[in-house]
């Protein structure tokens, strides 16, 4: 089946769309424009089919409830492949398949899969439309749900297509929900070709190909080719009471407070601070002509986890989803409003539309909301700046009951790469049934780096050489506990106290205390105004147990063994230097 592309469409793009149409055999083809009329039509289509359920128009206007197949509720990392010609280029951090084998497998799955369906062609931009830091893509899908989510999550439509036509380049993504059979579900990435193929899932990161697939796995490889970084990081703007403006990027594994930090609200005892959210999940970082590292958020919306989002835990997030939101796999009240654990009252229906309470959790633990970033009360308009924002700091963090202090500063950029590579979290009983199981997640990128971690770390070192004014690098741990298992630090808005110390360090207003692992705050330099925190607790929060860190270094070196053949010399130097400092 041939399709008529919009006038002026690049010939290679038209050819690819025609080839896909011939393979998948859809009943019709729609080139998406991103218009409001298109959005209304697709929404009504899903309402009429029963896939969308309109929510209470008084409390949740223009919002809809959607349930996915119960076997299709999250990313499937074991079925997510990086397809490089040589297995070693994908690295031990990825699941590998040879490109030829992968394409043969996917061609068999895609053959005729869109019969009776509509094929949507979605041109999209990751980042502000006019930004030189932005990159472009086209996703082909047979899911109207995907189209509507991509409209929120990216700059999708005619404007993106015009840029693609002018530049002649884009990341290509082919997606079909297939039969939603887990045994026929594969997500393939071909970094050398800037190509993605996803079959058998209609959910989240498996289907919204602009998100993890493009913006991290393919973009990380693309960034290595072109000299920039694609990172699993939030972007936050801070203005001090004195009017000084700084921007920070932060990378945390899951369950470590990433979204809460991105939308941080200052405590009442710290008046005068203003916080703006530039991004909550992904950042692209590029060295600037001024020697600084500049960042954009490539996304235009949030695909956030609903459970745990309440007025108490994250006021901004809770407010921004009060309208114009797609809710996926949440429960429903008898008033036709979304509900999940942690909210007041009880639901009438669970996440599959069944009577609540008869089949386990009311909302699925990975239930999601999709909403435009501009609805966030703390939205920073700098997110649309084509030049991006200059970074003053990069923050890494994990969940550690002991060992890692509340905060420390890397000695320099290269030491900061080691700090990022050593990021780890300990599991909790609530999540896994086991306490204290250490999971290493370098730079919070383990599921998302599109090539060998050793080459990735070398790329970080190479970026540092381009920076004459690099951001400072810090590590935080909001989760240190005492002997009774109680958290020592209050967290949430009070994390601003730690950020304030970082800003003072960046502005060279205070000194720091040197330790073997890095530079630490002096107790008097952490703002405790309005905070009940005993001196003894602060001492414990900032303690560095040298013997425990020697053991940590041994564990870290063992964790790095799989990457030994490509471990950068600079990383070995940093490990040796840390060992020397620990030995005194």
Image (spheres, rainbow, N blue to C red):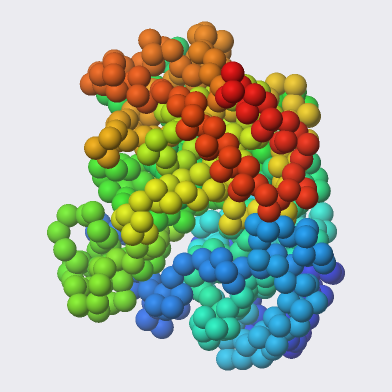
Q: Position of residue 396 (x, y in %)?
A: 53, 36
Left or right relative to 406: residue 465? right
Going 71% across and 42% down the picture, which residue do you hit? 457
- Quadrant, the N terminus: bottom right
Q: Position of residue 376 (x, y in %)?
A: 41, 44
Is residue 6 among the parts visible in the rendering? Answer: no
Residue farthest left in this picture: 345
Left or right relative to 234: residue 55? left
In the figure, residue 84 lies in which quadrant?
Answer: bottom right
**Residue closest to the eye, 542 or 463:** 542
Q: Position of residue 308 (x, y in %)?
A: 31, 52
In the figure, residue 115 lies in which quadrant?
Answer: bottom right
- Quadrant, the C terminus: top right
* Residue 544 to residue 1: above or below: above
Is residue 192 among the parts visible in the rendering? Answer: yes
In the figure, residue 124 lies in which quadrant?
Answer: bottom right
Residue farthest right in this picture: 11
């Amino acid at each position: 089946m041939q399709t008529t592309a919009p006038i002026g469409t690049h010939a290679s793009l038209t050819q690819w769309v025609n080839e896909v149409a011939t393979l998948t055999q859809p009943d019709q083809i729609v080139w998406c424009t991103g218009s409001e009329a298109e959005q209304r039509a697709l929404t009504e289509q899903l309402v009429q089919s029963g896939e969308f359920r309109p929510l209470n128009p008084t409390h949740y206007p223009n919002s809809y409830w959607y349930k996915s197949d119960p076997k299709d509720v999250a990313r499937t990392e074991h079925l997510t492949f990086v397809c490089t010609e040589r297995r070693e280029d994908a690295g031990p951090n990825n699941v590998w398949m040879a490109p030829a084998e992968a394409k043969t497998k996917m061609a068999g799955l895609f053959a005729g899969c869109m019969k009776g369906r509509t094929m949507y062609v979605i041109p999209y931009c990751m980042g502000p439309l006019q930004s030189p830091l932005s990159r472009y893509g086209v996703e082909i899908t047979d899911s109207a749900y995907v189209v509507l989510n991509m409209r929120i999550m990216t700059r999708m439509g005619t404007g993106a297509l015009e840029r693609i036509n002018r530049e002649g380049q884009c990341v290509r993504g082919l997606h079909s929900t297939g039969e939603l059979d887990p045994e026929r579900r594969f997500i393939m990435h071909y970094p050398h070709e800037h190509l993605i193929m996803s079959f058998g899932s209609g959910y989240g990161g498996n289907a919204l190909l602009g998100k993890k697939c493009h913006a991290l796995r393919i973009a990380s490889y693309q960034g290595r080719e072109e000299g920039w970084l694609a990172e699993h990081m939030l972007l936050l703007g801070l203005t001090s009471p004195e009017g000084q403006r700084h921007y920070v990027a932060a990378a945390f594994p899951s369950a470590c407070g990433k979204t809460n930090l991105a939308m941080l609200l200052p405590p009442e005892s710290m008046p005068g601070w203003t916080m703006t959210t530039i991004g909550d999940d992904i950042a692209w970082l590029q060295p600037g002509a001024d020697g600084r590292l500049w960042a954009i958020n490539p996304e235009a919306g949030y695909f956030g986890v609903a459970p745990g989002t309440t007025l108490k835990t994250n006021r901004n997030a809770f407010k921004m989803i009060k309208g114009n939101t797609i809710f996926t796999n949440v429960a429903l009240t008898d008033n036709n409003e979304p509900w999940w654990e942690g909210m007041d009252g009880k639901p009438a229906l669970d996440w599959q539309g069944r009577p609540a309470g008869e089949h386990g959790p009311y909302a699925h633990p990975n239930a999601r909301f999709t909403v435009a970033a501009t609805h966030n009360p703390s939205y920073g308009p700098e997110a649309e700046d084509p030049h991006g924002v200059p970074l003053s700091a990069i923050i890494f963090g994990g969940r550690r009951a002991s060992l890692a202090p509340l905060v420390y500063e890397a000695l320099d950029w290269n030491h900061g790469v080691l700090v990022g590579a050593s990021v780890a979290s300990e599991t909790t009983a609530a999540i896994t049934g086991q306490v204290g199981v250490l999971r290493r997640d370098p730079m919070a990128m383990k599921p998302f780096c599109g090539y060998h971690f050793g080459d990735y770390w070398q790329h970080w070192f190479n970026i540092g050489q381009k920076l004459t004014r690099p951001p400072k690098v810090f590590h935080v741990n909001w989760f240190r506990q005492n002997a009774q298992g109680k958290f020592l630090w209050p967290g949430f808005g009070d994390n601003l106290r730690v950020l304030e110390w970082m800003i003072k360090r960046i502005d060279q207003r205070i000194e720091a205390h040197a330790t073997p692992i890095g530079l630490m705050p002096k107790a008097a330099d952490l703002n405790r105004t309005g905070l009940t925190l005993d001196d003894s607790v602060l001492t414990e929060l900032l303690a560095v147990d040298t013997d425990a860190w020697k053991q940590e270094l041994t564990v870290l070196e063992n964790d790095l063994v799989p990457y030994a053949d490509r471990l950068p010399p600079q990383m070995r130097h940093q490990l040796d230097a840390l060992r020397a400092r620990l030995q005194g």
